[in-house]
Image (spheres, rainbow, N blue to C red):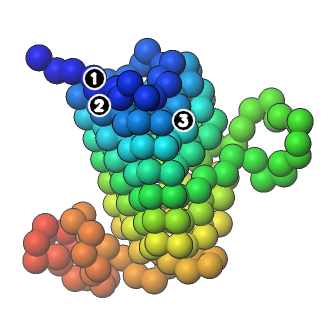
Amino acid sequence: MACLRIHDLSDVQSKDIGENTSIWQYVVVLPGAKIGSNCNINALVFIENDVIIGNNVTVKSGVQIWDGLRIAHNVFIGPNVTFSNDLFPRSKRRPSEFIKTNIEDHASIGANATIIAGVTIGAYSLIGAGSVVTKDVPPHGLVYGNPARIQGYVCNCGQRIGKGDTCPSCGFSL
């Protein structure tokens, strides 16, 4: 039988969490959040209400997932990744709706990257650790730096490949 594993030291208010998902200690999940099946939400994560997380997603420690984030399936979010959801934040002023940020299927975001509100991180893309992503990232794009810029492309298994090359491991070609 499938199960849901929620650590006793977490505060999980959402009832919309899929089977075989693990939520570790000191995690807060607000009531409106939707989390898919077979996810691993590591310690010290905060998930707001207007959030959708797909299946097979890994969220490492120290990540806050704010209103407006849409995270597709099979996504990896490294430790201490920072998301924003408001381009013009002010104390005590809440917008009527937060900007949507989309992380597409199989994308991977390295540790300590910062993702600015409103961008789309394309399917199978790879964001280097410490990058500041201010613009959309195309599918299979490899970006890093501050600001993050396209440095190349990766295949389905995450290996760097060039235009016209075929990955020997997964067979993907650009």
Q: Amino acid at mark 3?
A: Ile
What residue is disc 3 on? 47
Whether label 3 touches label 2, CB < 8 Å: no
Sequence order check: which comes first, mark 1 or mark 2?
1
Residue 87, placed above or below residue 53: below
Residue 62, x across and y down, in percent: 51, 51
Q: Is residue 73 something one can see in this rendering?
A: no
| Crowding near the residue tagged with mark 3, few <14, some 14–19, many ≥20 C-alpha atoms within 10 Å | many
Q: In front here: 19 or 4?
A: 4
Q: Is residue 6 left or right of residue 98?
A: left
Q: Residue at x 45, y 73 (%)?
A: 128
Q: Secondary structure at mark 1?
A: loop
Q: Amino acid at mark 2?
A: Thr
**Residue at mark 1 to residue at mark 2: CA–CA distance:** 5 Å
Q: Is residue 152 something one can see in this rendering?
A: yes
Whether label 1 touches label 2, CB < 8 Å: yes
Q: In front here: 46 or 127?
A: 46
What residue is disc 2 on? 21
Q: Residue at x 65, y 58 (%)?
A: 116
Residue 24, x across and y down, in percent: 37, 36
Q: Quadrant of the N terminus?
A: top left
| Crowding near the residue tagged with mark 2, few <14, some 14–19, many ≥20 C-alpha atoms within 10 Å | many
Q: Residue at x 83, y 34 (%)?
A: 94
